[in-house]
Amino acid sequence: MPSRRNLIASLAAGVGMAATLRPARSLAQATGTGEGQKMWGGRFSEKPGAIMQEINVSIDVDRRFWKQDLRASRAHAAMLAKQKIITGEDATKIDAGLATIEGEITAGTFPFRREFEDIHLNVEARLGELIGPSAGRLHTARSRNDQVATDFRLWVRAAIGQIDTAITRSGAQVGDSIYISSLPGWSAAGLAIIEKDLETDLALHAVSEFCAPTVDYSAAVQFSNGKATSLCDISDALVIQAEQIASASQVQLSIEKDLISQHPEFGTLNELADSQGVDVWALTDHDEIGGQQRAAEAAHAHGMAYLTGTGGEKLPDGLDPKSVIVERSVPAAALADALLAWEMNGVPISLAHGGPLRLIVPGYTGVNNIKYVKRLAFTAQETDARIMSHGYRISPPGAKGDPSQPSVQEMTVKSWINGPGTDGAPLKAGDTQIHGVAFGGMNAVAKVEVSLDGGKTWQLARMVGPDLGRFAWRQFVFAARLPAGQFTLASRATDTAGNVQPEQRMENAGGYNNTSWADHAVKVSVA
């Protein structure tokens, strides 16, 4: 029997395979003498070879599903009878036979047999021995895929216990203890060495943990006794997920190094880290939860000043890749807010929006948000790709871009008016509502002012709609009474760092980052 730590891997290798590799068979052939694999005889004249049979066997793992399998089978038989698919007599025999099997398993006398591969076939074969041909009707209208899914779900529900209230990320409280389902660091180690072609036992184990982490379910006791306050998976690493809990719960989390180092596997992990010249705590992280920010700081400490993203477009043959490749570098500190996005609004990102994977760097201009991203790297220098060295540069009017000029990267605070009068139509005199949007660039929007006279005087506008955070657009409105005449409507935003939207544009050849409120003003006629 596998350990708890190996349960997930075992289930993946056992139950999943058992659900997908076997052809259909007659249940009548699954009854009787312990020859087991003769159930394949519906399609094959010979039973599978010993190797194939051994690959398919999962009873050593899924025998623990016996309660769930019996429960689901009894319910299925009752349904078949209710729908008049099988007779009431057959249903009664099946139910009695399954009850007998439950008694045998409880008493330890049930003959678990590897020739019947899994718990489902073991039960059905024994049922055939107990009640005869009626057993073959139990499998009507279901497959073993159905049984696997149902049994596993029922087993998981039983394993974690009854939960009366939802356990969310936002429930962590001051004084709570942190329970970790697996030793942090192994998966990160596997990711770090996966391209190094190391074939030591430790390296292979790390890669295995990265591909299919094992989990210790002993902490599940905390879920069933009502003491758990917050819960989160660690598929994206302990530090990142813990940061999510801390943020959602508005608490600070502290990971104690001493407790982690006491784990039986820590010494082995440390040995692997030493062999690669890596500080083990760089793999596990610790103390203050910082996530991406800590990664950016670590990169900077090692002389890596930039985060460089590379697009995955197919390049024309015969050209210097650096002349056409879409590759941009942003300061490594941008990693603190950056995202790798594969979905938008709950659906996969379309090709037009940069799918299947796109780099999102909030606060930076669109060209830095690499589409079809295939590689991210920390680099000491900006990429020498032409799009970086000569394209999207703040060049003097009439000049061409070159590396000596500032790159188009961070956005600054801006706003504009969306109405009324933007369509050129005259307005009626009287009360009107001026509305628009504002964006803070690298900072949140603090306020927006509106001018009716082309910037001579300003009045504070009112923010409307939800505040969705630092990098979100904000809507604003301003109630005004306009008499007949000519007006120049303008808006001016200020960010939380005190930066004010400028009146004049930053002149450059490409017209980049034009946030001038004067250029975005709206002239209206009121009659």
Image (spheres, rainbow, N blue to C red):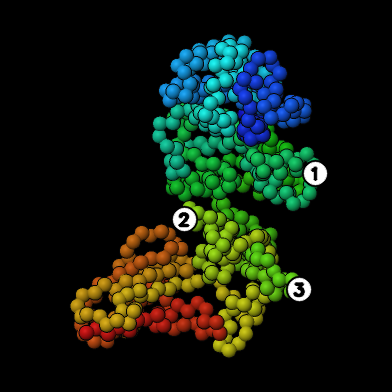
Residues at circles 1 and 2 in contact by the CB criterion of under 8 Å? no
Give the residue type at disc 2: Asn
Q: Nearer the viewer, residue 59 or 246?
A: 59
Question: Taking 76 as reference, is 128 left or right?
Answer: right
Q: Residue at x 50, y 82 (%)?
A: 506
- Label 3: which secondary element: loop
User: Residue 526 — which label?
Assistant: none
Within-10-Å neighbours for mark 2: few <14, some 14–19, many 20+: few
Q: Circles 3 and 2: CB distance less than 8 Å?
A: no
Q: Please, which residue is most extreme toward the bottom here?
A: 398
Q: Is residue 14 above or below residue 477?
A: above
Residue 419 on image: x %, y %: 32, 75
Taking the spot 58% from the left edge, 47% from the top edge, the residue there is 236
Residue at 72% over, 29% down: 44
Quarter-of-image position of residue 479: bottom left
Instruction: Answer with the quarter of the image where residue 492 lies.
Output: bottom left
- Residue 35 visible to an observer of this rendering: yes
- Front position among marks 3 and 1: 3
Residue highlighted by disc 3? 318
In the rendered view of the protein, which quadrant contains the N terminus? top right
Disc 1: which residue: 199
Which of the labelled discs sits on residue 345, or is there none?
A: 2
- Secondary structure under tag 1 reads loop
Quadrant where the C terminus sits is bottom left
Q: Tell which tag, 1 or 2, sits nearer the viewer.
A: 2
Sequence order check, earlier mark of 1 and 2: 1
Residue 361 drawn at (x, y percent): 54, 63
